[in-house]
Amino acid sequence: MRNWKNLTAIILVTICCVSFSSQEKPVRLYLIGDSTMADYTGDYDPGKDYMETRYPLTGWGQVFQEFMVSDSLPQLEKLVKTDSIFVDNRARGGRSTRTFFQEGRWRSVYENLKPGDLVLMQFGHNDAAENKPERYVDIEGYKEFLRLYVQQTRDKNAIPVILTPVARNYPWENARLENVHGEYYQAARDVAAEMQVLMIDLNRLSMDYFSEKGRDYVTANYFMNLPAEKYTAYPEGLSDNTHFQPEGAKAVAQLVFNAMKNLEVN
């Protein structure tokens, strides 16, 4: 009987060890970009209460962790095989490809990248701001910084993904939302093709989806168009057709997650 007990114990230990060793290493998914992607909770504004100073402002990256639950991860198996993904959101309002690099924000990502990690990069809103020279980056500069982020991600054996910039809520023509990002939209696509890097055409996806929902609906429910006296942070209301309310942020995050299902690492 004692021998049987010993054998059972050995078998259980062996099973546990095999099970532990077969688990995939957790993957860190970095988000780098601008205010439409940012997470405004936590220490984004140190010492300030998000609910009182920012809410309902919500970047789509702020809600992205909700999509990375264990039951959903098998849908991403062509891109990454893991049983755990942690979303590390480094996006920051007002940043272009250039200022994100110059402020050392990319360095802090690069130094911590591990093989198999993911880097989703979405810029363009601020790069195109010619009236704000502290942010502005011309088309060639925009391309060059995207190339840098892609190459340095690859240098760490991590996986870069370029996202075209998410749509703003204008211009509308014949009940359809059109491209507001000018040449920056195509520039992101060009770099993805040139470097054969994975791409999510978020501009096109969001233009199409917002058009399906309709201008009135997305204006009231997706973007930061707020009535007066409803939210503590905006007592006079707000008219903002760039940034998202929670419903809009979740809709965009869903578009990104759905697109990730079709990405495949060769």
Image (spheres, rainbow, N blue to C red):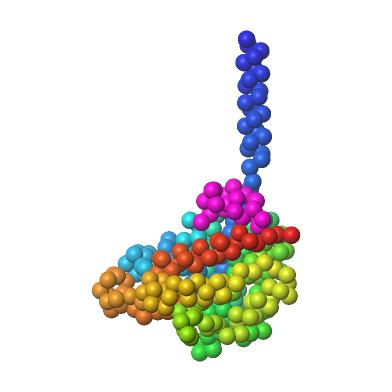
Q: Is residue 156 above or below residue 239?
A: above
| Residue 250 lies in the magenta stretch | no
Magenta segment = 67-85
- When asked about the image quadrant of residue 88, the answer is bottom right
- The answer to which of 96 and 266 lies nearer the viewer is 266
Seen at 55% across and 65% down, the residue is 256
- When asked about the image quadrant of residue 248, the answer is bottom left
Q: Is residue 131 visible?
A: yes
Seen at 54% across and 48% down, the residue is 70
Quarter occupied by the N terminus: top right
| Residue 69 lies in the magenta stretch | yes
- The answer to which of 99 and 263 lies nearer the viewer is 263
Task: Give the total of numbered labels.
Answer: 0
Main SS of residues in magenta: loop
Q: Is residue 105 visible?
A: no
Q: Is residue 140 above or below residue 243?
A: below
- The answer to which of 150 and 76 lies nearer the viewer is 76
Quarter occupied by the C terminus: bottom right
Point out residue 74 in the picture as x, y percentages from the top left corner: 60, 50
Point out residue 173 in the picture as x, y percentages from the top left corner: 48, 86
